[in-house]
Image (tube, rainbow, N blue to C red):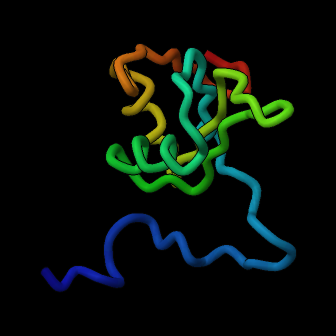
Amino acid sequence: GGMMGGGMGGGMSRSLGGGAPPAAEGTKLFVGGLPNINTDEMRAYFSAHGTVSDAIVMVRNGIPRGFGFVTFEDAVTAQLVLSVNHVIKGKTVELKMADGKR
């Protein structure tokens, strides 16, 4: 399997000046109804569906608040993830676009 270098859209062309580049349009998802998991566990779950560029579980005073955000490398993956039901640790989670668009 020697397909390194070719492939999808040449994602390495953006400059890396000053931290992470802004997320591409339509790649960031809101994740609600989370079980008691941390960011690493949520990232690992969604990594099974595509390349996760960013993930965070929101926490207040050390207590998970039951929602978070996951950002995928491309909008196609994000839409695919949005289109199916997700159950994490026996809990059905609710996904929607983080930017408020449907």
Task: In this rendered view, identify the residue nearer to me: 70 or 100.
Answer: 70
The residue located at (63%, 27%) in the rendering is 30
Q: Position of residue 100 (x, y in %)?
A: 72, 19
Q: How many marks?
A: 0
Q: Residue furthest left?
A: 1
- Residue pictured at 37% horizontal, 32% vertical: 80
Q: Which residue shows up at 57% across the image and 57% down it? A: 53
Nearer to the camera, 28 or 33: 33
Please determine whether, in this image, residue 89 is positioned above or below residue 76.
above
| In-image side of 68 versus 33 (left or right) | right
Residue shown at 40% from the left, 32% from the top: 81
Q: Position of residue 48 (x, y in %)?
A: 33, 47
Among all residues in the image, which is located at the extreme front? Answer: 62
Q: Quadrant of residue 71?
A: top right
Task: Establish if 72 lies above or below 93.
Answer: below
Q: Quadrant of the C terminus?
A: top right
For residue 17, what is the image quadrant?
A: bottom right
**Where is the N terminus found, in terms of image quarters?**
bottom left
Q: Quadrant of residue 68?
A: top right
Residue 4 lies left or right of residue 94; in this view the side is left
Q: Nearer the viewer, residue 71 or 9?
A: 71
Give how far across and how far down residue 90 sits, in percent: 35, 18
Q: Nearer the viewer, residue 86 or 38?
A: 38
Give percent across and percent down for residue 67.
Answer: 65, 24
